[in-house]
């Protein structure tokens, strides 16, 4: 693992950096089909998360 990755993970672990702005949508596992259908509808989405 490179130095940059170590630094990035350290920031995440200590709450110094939030990934929330990068998540475009959250779906439950019950709505997984909706999650897969949302991807082609929003190609600019950085991340669509499925909560388990």
Image (cartoon, rainbow, N blue to C red):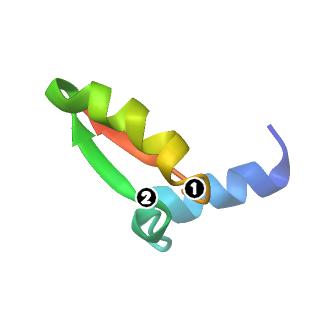
How far apart are the two marked residues, 1 and 2, measured between alpha carbons?
7 Å
Instruction: Please indicate, yes or no, whether residue 52 appears anywhere in the rendered image.
Output: no
Judged from the image, the secondary structure of the residue bearing numbered disc 1 is loop
* Label disc, if present, on residue 5 of the rendered structure: none
Return the x and y of residue 11 as percentages of the image width and height.
55, 65
Q: Nearer the viewer, residue 40 or 18?
A: 40
Q: Quadrant of the C terminus?
A: top left
Q: Is residue 32 left or right of residue 44?
A: left
Return the x and y of residue 25 as percentages of the image width and height.
34, 54
Q: Are marks 1 and 2 in contact (CB under 8 Å)?
A: yes
Instruction: Please indicate, yes or no, whether residue 14 appears anywhere in the rendered image.
Output: yes
Q: Which residue is mark 1?
A: 46
Judged from the image, the secondary structure of the residue bearing numbered disc 2 is loop
Binning the other alpha carbons within 10 Å of mark 1 as few (below 14), some (14 to 19) or many (20 upward) gives few
Kindly indicate the quadrant of the structure image that contains residue 28. top left
**Compared to 36, does 17 lie above or below?**
below
Q: Residue furthest front?
A: 41
Q: Quadrant of the N terminus?
A: top right
Residue drawn at point x = 44 percent, y = 69 percent? 18
Return the x and y of residue 40 as percentages of the image width and height.
54, 42
Q: Name the N-terminal-most of marks 1 and 2.
A: 2
Return the x and y of residue 32 as percentages of the image width and height.
28, 27
Q: Is residue 30 left or right of residue 39?
A: left
Q: Is residue 48 left or right of residue 4?
A: left
Q: Nearer the viewer, residue 5 or 31?
A: 31
* Label disc, if present, on residue 23 of the rendered structure: 2
Binning the other alpha carbons within 10 Å of mark 2 as few (below 14), some (14 to 19) or many (20 upward) gives few
Residue drawn at point x = 35 percent, y = 36 percent? 35
**Compared to 2, does 14 lie above or below?**
below
Q: Residue furthest right?
A: 2
């Amino acid at each position: 693992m490179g130095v940059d990755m170590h630094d990035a993970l350290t920031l995440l672990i200590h709450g110094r950096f939030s990934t929330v702005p990068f998540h475009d949508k959250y779906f439950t596992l019950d709505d997984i089909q909706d999650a897969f259908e949302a991807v082609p509808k929003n190609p600019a989405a950085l991340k669509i998360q499925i909560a388990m």
